[in-house]
Amino acid sequence: MTPFDAYKQYLALKNHFSKDKYDYHKYAGKSRASVESFNKRKDKYWFEKLSRQKSDEEIKNFYIANFVEADDPNSLWIGNVIRAGDIYYKEWTKRQQSLQYLFTQESQTFFSEYNLDQAFDCSKGHPPVLKKFLSGKISPETLVIYDRIFLIRNNFDKKLLDPIWESVSLKIKKYTPFLNIDVFRYKKILKDTIIGD
């Protein structure tokens, strides 16, 4: 990947995670960027460094990790990515490598406090699952898996009309295509977690 390609990849993934209508997969990661605009950037040396240090797949995953971690991907400044990006990338990579274990541990802890009805009940505002996610007790990956199993976005989108949920809902929607999840296997893990062996 050339430095300009690394920049285009950054723009495409930023658009994907921050704009409801843009779909990275549908548009094959294309973005409207010109070499001229790239050459005028003060941070272009960073894209050059990134393209030398990481493979194409690592660059893509590096960006995904940072956009998933961001509270607001649209306002994620490249300077923050330069400073803290490697930390988020390492944490993200670790979560990917132990996804099944992470999901099992987080689910055991979560469902020791709440039953299924309570966990996703939003009749009195933010449901426990959202509160746990916002406090960092549930990872973005576990939240995406819960959505794949229980379709929580469909339910919460109708009932929770607030900016906090809207940003989390968008994050789930945008992150889901990047996670290859065997829903059947995670349903079984959850069933064993809730009911017991």
Image (spheres, helix red, strand yellow):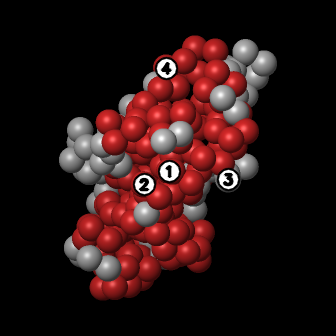
Q: Residue 181, can we see it?
A: yes
Q: Residues within 10 Å of mark 3 (few under 14, many from 20)?
A: few
Label 1 with label 2: CB-CB less than 8 Å = yes
Which of disc 3 and disc 2 is earlier in sequence?
2
> Label 2 sits on what residue type?
Gln
In this figure, which residue is indicated by the disc labeled 1?
103
Q: Residues within 10 Å of mark 1 (few under 14, many from 20)?
A: many
CA–CA distance in space, label 1 to label 4: 21 Å
- Across and down, in percent, residue 120 comes to 63, 26
- Across and down, in percent, residue 63 comes to 42, 62
Q: Residue furthest right?
A: 124
Question: What residue appears at the point 51 percent right and 51 percent down from the top-left corner?
Answer: 104
Left or right, residue 26 beside residue 191: left
Q: Between 187 and 180, which is closer to the camera in this rendering? A: 187
Which of disc 3 and disc 4 is earlier in sequence?
3
CA–CA distance in space, label 2 to label 4: 24 Å
> Label 4 sits on what residue type?
Asn
Residue at disc 1, secondary structure: helix
Q: Nearer the viewer, mark 2 or mark 4?
A: 2
Q: Which mark is residue 100?
A: 2
In this figure, which residue is indicated by the disc labeled 4?
154
Which of disc 4 and disc 1 is earlier in sequence?
1
In this figure, which residue is indicated by the disc labeled 3?
136
Question: What residue appears at the point 32 percent right and 71 percent down from the top-left corner?
Answer: 58
Q: Quadrant of the N terminus?
A: bottom left
Q: Nearer the viewer, mark 1 or mark 4?
A: 1
Question: Is 171 located above or below residue 93 in the figure?
Answer: above
Label 4 with label 3: CB-CB less than 8 Å = no
Q: Between 89 and 182, which is closer to the camera in this rendering? A: 182
